[in-house]
Image: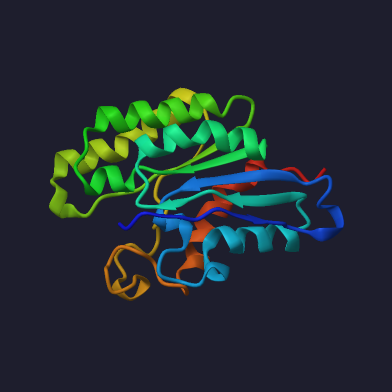
């Protein structure tokens, strides 16, 4: 997946923006809106839903296309200082898996990121690999996310593509990145996992 810096700040509702807390989205191209208009990406749609549902949060999307867990671990500290988020959504690891990187390193990087989040609430978003990567590697890959979520007792979405991963028309021509129309399905998956962390006051 190509690497390109994408950092955006979306204000969820102007009339309470001064009191709004920040949700930091920290992912790769799947969260950076690769190949589509940024206004259609699921983090942007999240900001709109928060406003529509009257939740006092703004969304900072610090996702980078091509990012690995190693790069994310190196970048998270400065991002935490910049945005001081109340909630951190970690959606990394897909590129580690696609490149066949050692899973112990991915686990270590994601573990470090969860720990860095400190007092912020964390939502960990998991991924699945295509079957051609081998059954054992694919199963162990998924277990990294589940194990971290359990050990840290954090909010967890096992699979960002749940409900549409097997639908070819849900993805762009590369077969990896969801289309603009599919972003709402991704948001629905994220929303269900995120909702218990949200507060209206």
- Scheme by which the image is coloured: rainbow
Q: Position of residue 174 (x, y in %)?
A: 27, 69
Question: Is 94 left, or right, of 44 in this rendering?
Answer: left
User: In the image, is residue 89 above or below residue 77?
Assistant: below
Q: Can you give x and y, in whole percent of width and height, for residue 40 in the image?
A: 54, 70
Check the picture and name the quadrant holding the C terminus: top right
Residue at 44 percent across and 51 percent down: it is 64
Q: Residue furthest right?
A: 15
Relative depth, front residue between 60 and 2: 2
Q: Where does the image place residue 100, in percent across and percent down from the top left?
A: 19, 42
Quadrant of the drawing holding the N terminus:
bottom left
Quarter of the rendering containing residue 144: top left
User: In the rendered view, would you say 70 is above or below 62?
Assistant: above
In front: 108, or 139?
A: 108
Left or right: 80, with 200 as reference point: left
Classify residue 42 as left or right of residue 50: left
Q: Is residue 48 above or below residue 200?
A: below
Q: Is 109 situated above or below 43? A: above
Q: Nearer the viewer, residue 27 or 134?
A: 27
Q: Dividing the picture into quarters, in which one does residue 102 lie?
A: top left
Q: How many marks?
A: 0
**Residue shown at 56% from the left, 58% from the top:** 43
Residue at 25% in and 50% down:
129
Name which residue lies at 34% across and 42% down: 68
Counting from the top left corner in percent of width and height, residue 158 is at 41, 45
Asked where in the image residue 45 lies, by quadrant, the reply is bottom right
């Amino acid at each position: 997946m190509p690497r390109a810096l994408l950092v955006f700040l979306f204000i969820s509702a102007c009339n309470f923006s001064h009191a709004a807390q920040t949700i930091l989205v920290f992912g790769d191209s799947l969260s950076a809106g690769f190949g589509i208009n940024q206004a259609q990406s699921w983090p942007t749609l999240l900001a709109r839903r928060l406003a529509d549902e009257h939740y006092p949060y703004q969304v900072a999307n610090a996702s980078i296309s091509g990012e690995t867990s190693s790069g994310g671990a190196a970048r998270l500290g400065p991002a935490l200082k910049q945005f001081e988020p109340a909630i951190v959504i970690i959606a990394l690891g897909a590129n580690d898996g696609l490149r066949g990187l050692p899973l112990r390193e991915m686990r270590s990087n994601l573990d470090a990121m969860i720990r860095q989040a400190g007092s912020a609430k964390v939502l960990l978003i998991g991924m699945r690999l295509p079957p051609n990567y081998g059954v054992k590697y694919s199963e162990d890959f998924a277990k990294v996310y589940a194990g971290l979520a359990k050990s840290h007792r954090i909010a967890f979405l096992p699979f960002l593509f749940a409900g549409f991963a097997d639908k070819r028309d849900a993805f762009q021509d590369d077969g990896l990145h969801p289309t603009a129309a599919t972003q709402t399905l991704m948001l629905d998956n994220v929303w269900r996992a995120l909702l218990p962390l949200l507060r209206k006051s």
